[in-house]
């Protein structure tokens, strides 16, 4: 299969490596970066030293960039196109891919930030696609996965979600192998909501751990966070069981507790007293929860959904509450039934 990965950050690079080294009938994998200097550096070092240092690129992995801004030749015979940019780049990528005949899948996890002058709230990936490239056959690859571990070949399970069987099958063919299991799911909405909301919740657990509130508090945040993620997903048309799967509970547990998480790190840095700007600047990678949190809350409010943990994260990011006040606001809520 010919696979083109558009975007050479940590995650795009890790998945391109994983696909290129699958045993059996080899895939032809092309990794494209918009920055020609980055491609030149990757060619010279056979590593992505900026985003995934210390991991060798397989000899078979092709790097595209000289033909920047767009790898038209590789795309022409692609059996699968993978958009590996952050949410901020997805709209532009889908606009350019509009009319492309082969399956397209994105890896980003979040809501698009609201667009200036638009007045509308930010969108999930499938909503952006419906607006800008309705004819594309698309899906999303998600689930608990730190790029470094996938690149090293450590066991990982992901979910390939799409309403189109052809897209699910293309993703399984492209990535399923001895160290990467790909489960198929037709609930792309639920998978996208899980991936977006878990990042916001990971900021909350990072804050909780940074303030040394204890393991009880962290477990409570994860569990009640899963409830609010599920409430939003159901209101947006997802299925409840999706939130018990890899892209819901699985990714929430990983991101909320794993120290490789950038979103969790943001919460920890805020707890140390850093400003949001200082925290974001220190990462060197995108932390999608920072950009999605306001939209999560805005969409929930429009739907009449209560999301107190996400509300607390937004108040913190906006500087309306200090870390200790955000905790007090959550704990000071009235008693309620333990339901969704
Ligand atoms: N890193 C992980 O472990 C991981 C795992 C699963 C999912 N994700 C998700 O994948 C997405 C990408 O994350 P990452 O870790 O690769 O990010 P990263 O910060 O490592 O790299 C981002 C890459 O995207 C490029 N980029 C940024 N804006 C762009 C645009 N508008 N157009 C084209 N390219 C653009 C940057 O140049 C860079 O190469 C995020 O949504 C993230 O939540 C990441
Ligand atoms: O490092 P984070 O917080 O962006 O999380 C990375 C992945 O989404 C975990 O599945």
Image (cartoon, rainbow, N blue to C red):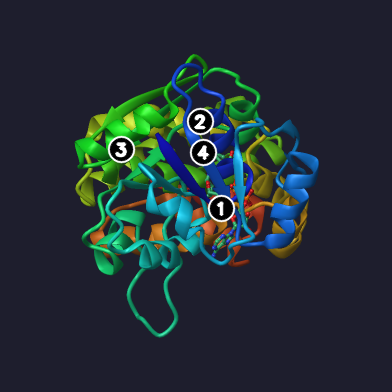
Whether the residues at callouts 3 and 2 have beta carbons within 8 Å, the answer is no
Please determine whether, in this image, residue 35 is positioned above or below residue 25: below
Residue at position x 51%, y 63% from top? 70
Instruction: Classify 10 Å Cα crowding around label 2: few (below 14), some (14-19), many (20 and above).
Output: many
Q: What's the CA distance linking mark 2 and mark 1?
A: 15 Å
Instruction: Classify 10 Å Cα crowding around label 1: few (below 14), some (14-19), many (20 and above).
Output: many
Please determine whether, in this image, residue 291 is positioned above or below residue 203: below
Residue at position x 65%, y 35% from top? 213
Look at the numbered disc 4 and give the secondary structure of its residue: strand
Q: What's the CA distance linking mark 1 and mark 3?
A: 20 Å
The disc, 4 or 1, on the residue closer to the chain's N-terminal end is 1
Measured as percent of width and height from the top left, residue 21 is found at: 56, 25
Whether the residues at callouts 2 and 4 have beta carbons within 8 Å, the answer is yes
Q: Along the horizontal axis of the image, is 291 left or right of 336?
A: right
Q: Quadrant of ligand 2?
A: top right
Please determine whether, in this image, residue 9 is positioned above or below residue 294: above
Measured as percent of width and height from the top left, residue 283 is found at: 73, 51
Q: Determine which residue is flagged by label 4.
A: 29
């Amino acid at each position: 299969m010919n696979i083109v990965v558009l975007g050479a950050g940590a995650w795009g690079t890790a998945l391109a490596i994983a696909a290129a080294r699958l045993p059996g009938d080899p895939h032809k994998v092309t990794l494209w970066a918009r920055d020609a200097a980055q491609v030149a550096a990757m060619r010279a070092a056979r590593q992505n030293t900026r985003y995934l240092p210390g991991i060798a690129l397989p000899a078979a992995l092709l790097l595209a960039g000289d033909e920047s801004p767009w790898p038209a030749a590789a795309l022409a015979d692609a059996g699968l196109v993978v958009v590996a940019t952050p949410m901020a780049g997805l709209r532009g990528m889908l606009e350019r891919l509009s009319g492309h005949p082969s399956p397209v899948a994105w890896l980003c996890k979040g809501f698009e930030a609201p667009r200036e002058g638009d007045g509308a709230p930010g969108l999930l990936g499938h909503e952006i696609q419906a607006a800008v490239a309705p004819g594309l056959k698309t899906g999303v690859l998600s689930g608990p996965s730190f790029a470094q571990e996938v690149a090293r070949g450590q066991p990982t399970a992901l979910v390939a979600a799409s309403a189109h069987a052809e897209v699910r099958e293309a993703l399984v063919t492209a990535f399923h192998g001895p160290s990467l299991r790909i489960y198929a799911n037709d609930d792309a909405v639920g998978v996208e909501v899980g991936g977006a909301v878990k990042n916001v919740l990971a900021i909350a657990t990072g804050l909780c751990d940074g303030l040394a509130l204890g393991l009880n508090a962290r477990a409570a945040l994860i569990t009640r966070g899963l409830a609010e993620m599920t409430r939003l997903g159901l209101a947006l048309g997802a299925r409840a069981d999706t939130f018990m799967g890899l892209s819901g509970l699985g990714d929430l547990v990983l991101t909320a507790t794993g120290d490789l998480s950038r979103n969790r790190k943001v919460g920890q840095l805020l707890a140390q007293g850093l400003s949001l700007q200082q925290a974001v600047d220190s990462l060197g990678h995108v932390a999608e929860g920072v950009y999605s949190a306001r939209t999560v809350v805005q969409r929930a409010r429009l739907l009449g959904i209560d999301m107190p943990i996400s509300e607390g994260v937004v108040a913190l990011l906006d500087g309306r509450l200090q870390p200790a006040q955000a905790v007090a606001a959550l704990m000071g809520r009235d008693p309620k039934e333990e339901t969704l």
